[in-house]
Image (tube, grey):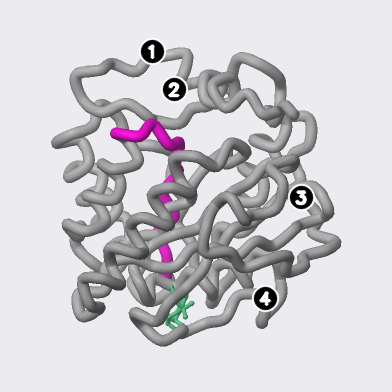
Amino acid sequence: MLNRRLAKSKSNFITKRRKKLVPLYEILSPFFVERPMKNTNSMKLTEAKFVTSAADYRKCPPPEKPEYAFIGRSNVGKSSLINMLVANKNLAKTSQTPGKTQLINHFEINKSWYLVDLPGYGFAKAPKAERDKWGEMIGEYLVNRENLICVFVLIDVRHEPQKVDIEFLDFLGEKEVPFYLVFTKADKVGSVTAEKNVESFKQTMLLSWTQVPQYFITSAERRTGRDELLKAIEELNLSFKK
Ligand code: GDP
């Protein structure tokens, strides 16, 4: 059984909101303290296969492998990013119909970890009942899935900080769900604008958080950030305890 608490304490995730100070060792490890990075090359992806779609975390595959969930506003570029990561154009379906009922999709990577494609949030036009259903399904999954090591929250780097993204991060903070940020579509803006928007996002986060978490600037189009993301996952896999 995964000791999620242990995995968290060894990570450099920011899981606490402002006023509850995060001990420095939690922020700096594991990259400095626990163990040296042995392998500087990124993970080789040999196999990626679809496992299940579930509407309930209790129906997800047995929690025997470390798991990483990807989520963001609809159209943020999540499917493109997942397909770029696993080097498969069709693993995750791109441009799904906004608001349509979606599920918790599990993919098994290298027979050793799960990549989870979660339905996007922020459908202003979706009926309230639909949004409530989404909230319940995803909320329960995020809070209760014991092998969930980290949530990768995708943010479109072209935009100013969006309220719905900040609210979602606040939810993760309240529930102490570890997360990293992944800025997407970096090729659509110049690097100067990307940096400026990331800085603006960080400043907005710092209004209610003590720290900003680790983040990645990516482009599915140019495969930017792939090695860094896979390396982070590989590193976190080492902290998984059955
Ligand atoms: P999802 O709804 O979050 O799964 O988003 P998709 O992956 O379907 O992407 C939404 C739209 O953005 C599609 O038209 C993609 O081609 C486009 N897109 C996604 N990622 C990138 C990127 O890195 N660069 C560019 N230029 N377009 C992207």
> How far is disc 4 from disc 2 in space, using C-alphas?
33 Å
Q: Quadrant of the N terminus?
A: top right
- Of the four image quadrants, the one with ligand 1 is bottom left
Name the residue beneath numbered marker 1: 23
Residue identified by numbered label 3:
43
Q: Nearer the viewer, mark 4 or mark 3?
A: 4
**Left or right, 95 with reference to 157:** right
The magenta stretch is: 174-185
Figure quadrant of residue 177: top left
Q: Sequence order check: which comes first, mark 4 or mark 1? A: 1
**Pointer 4 or 2: first along the chain:** 2
Q: Nearer the viewer, residue 190 or 10?
A: 10
Residue beneath the point at 44% across and 55% down: 182
Question: Mark 4 to mark 1: distance in Å?
Answer: 39 Å
Of helix, strand and loop, which one carries label 4? loop
Query: Of the numbered discs in the image, which one, if any, rests on residue 50?
Result: none
User: Would you say the residues marked 1 and 2 are in contact, meaning their CB atoms lie under 8 Å apart?
Assistant: yes
Which residue has dot 2 on it? 27
Residue at 38% from the left image edge and 31% from the top image edge? 176
- Indicate the amino acid at tag 1: Pro
Q: CA distance from mark 3 to mark 2?
A: 24 Å
SS for dot 1: loop
